[in-house]
Structure formats: C-alpha cells, structure tokens
Image: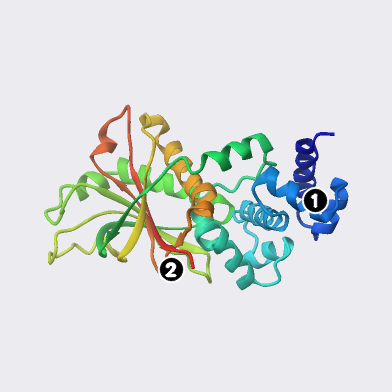
Amino acid sequence: METIVILQNVLEYIDHHITEKLTLEGLAQYAGFSMWHFSRVFQWGTGCSVMGYVRSRKLAFAASELHSGEKILDIAVKYGFETHSGFSKAFRRYYGCTPETYRCHACCTKPLTPSLPKMKIYFNGGIIMEPKFVTLPEINIVGFVCRTTSANDTNTHAIPEFWNDYMSSGKSEKLHKEAFLKKHWEYGICFPEDPETGEFEYVIGVEPKPDVEIPPEYAHRTIPAAEYAVFSTPPAKAADFTKAIQGTWNYIYNEWFPKSGYEYAPVCTDFELYDERCMNQNAQICDIYIPVVKRN
C-alpha cells in the first residue's frame, strides 16, 4: 500500500477516535511502522509532527462545538484538556484568540478529514490572503446596540436581523442626517463576551465629531487603540455580500491565524468598516479589522 494512502487512513483514524487518548506509539502501530519511521513519514506527508497534528485536530473539533451551548469546560474535557485555562491557552496559541472570541465569529461546522494532496498544496503555497497592518488610536462610536450570544448560533441570526432593522426602520437614515456626524462610514463592532453570561454587544455606529453633544437615544462606545491586521472582503454582489464577509471571517480564524505568527490582542475588539466601496451593488467590499500582537 502506498505511504500516502496509509497516512490518509491514519488521518481518518484520528478523526474517528478524536475524543480518545491518542499516542504516537498507538498511531505508529496502526500504520504498521516503527515510531521513528512513522514520525518521519508523517512529517513528510503532512508538514506536522504527529502529536502536534493530533492537538490541532482536537482543537478543531472542540472549536466546531463552541456554538452548541455547552460549557467551554465541558467541551475542553471531552477533547482531553483538564482545565478551562489549559484549553484556553492551547486554543489561543493555535487560533490566535480565546474560545469566547472565536465562537462570536467563526463558522463552527464539524471539520472534514483533510485530504493529503490538498494539504501538500497548502503547505507549499502558503497564505493566500495577506492583510495590511495599521495602528489606530481609540475610536469613538455613536449608534445602536444589540446584545446577543453565540450559544446555539443565536448571533448568526440576531446580527443580520439587527442590521435589517437598522436599514429598514429609518434608524440608518436618521443617524446619517445628524449634525454630529464626522463621516458616513459605518462600523459593525463586536465587543468582548461577558464570561459570566456568554452575552456580548454588537454595535452599529458611526464616528461623531469631537466635543459635540450626542442625543441620549444613541449609545456611545469606544474602540480601544490597537494594531490591526486589515482584511478586505472579496468583491461581491449585494445578494452575496453577507456570505463574502462570513467567508472572510472563517478564513481569518481557521486558516490565517494558525499560520500567521500573530494572535488576537487582549482587551481589544474587532470591527467591520463599511465605507463608500459598499455602495457598488455589483462589487461590494468591506474591511475587517482584527487587533493583533506578535506571538511570544
């Protein structure tokens, strides 16, 4: 049997037994190789160490369950992590953010078993979407607030409904006529999750002019100063714009962060910026700002 076929069988075995204790010795025995030979062959075939790959798959499966409504500790224990802090540390090291932040944005479908030919192309080809990096001071925002949760995918419905209400109820038109408006660019901001309740704030807003009075009907929030990795979504027709945005989020969290050398900056928040490029109904684009720091 060809080595590539044997390794593909090993990858499928790992996924089928992902909640069990997997060891280098046991996987080498399953492959029919000595541990030394298996380690070398696995590294050649996947670009990963054996146990490094196992850890990354356990994290991927754990990530896929973050929208289930289960407690993060219960998910962590299921995949072999003994404590919440240990799981969070490993998760942040791999995905560049906390489990709480990840489940606010990323698509949590069950991961498919990787195909070795595709993996080889990926390792050889590198990252396919490079961000630009900018450093911004704190940004004051005035607008409207939606409180939601990522449990059971609630936010994936609540946030689009919030935008729909904002656009159709007259709130957008009224906000953009206000004298305090600095510019017409809109922000969609996801503030950090409350660890006790699992809820977080999503804000739609604009930048006000400095030192102006804001009517009490509007919420006021501040985006902390940070260095950002900025990703532009691919041009999309209006009907496909939401999918393009979600696809970019998935790329950021599932592919870019693990390979980038960066992680999500603590005590910061991410946001989407909708400027004049969103006005082109046949090629809408927005920017996604992710606060980052270099990994230690």
> What numbered label is drawn on residue 37?
1
- Give the residue type that dot 1 points to: His
Q: Where is residue 237 in the image (x, y as percent from the top left)?
A: 37, 29
The mark found on residue 266 in the picture is: 2
Q: Residue at x 67, y 72 (%)?
A: 83
Residue 116 visible within the image: yes
- Drawn side of residue 30 relative to residue 289, left or right: right
Residue 163 picture location, percent across and down: 36, 45
Q: Residue at x 72, y 54 (%)?
A: 50
Q: What residue type is labelled 2?
A: Pro
Point out which mark residue 208 bears. none
The one nearer the camera, 255 or 173, is 255
- The answer to whether residue 115 is visible is no
Q: Which of 49 and 107 is in front in this view?
A: 49
Q: Is mark 2 on a helix, strand or loop?
A: loop
Q: In this view, does 135 lie to the left or right of 293?
A: left
Residue placed at 75% from the left, 45% from the top?
11
Q: Locate the N terminus and report the quarter of the image it occupies.
A: top right
Residue 207 shown left or right of residue 161 in the figure:
left
Q: Where is residue 224 in the image (x, y as percent from the top left)?
A: 32, 66
Which quarter of the picture shows residue 216?
Answer: bottom left
Q: How far apart are marks 2 and 1 (CA)?
A: 41 Å
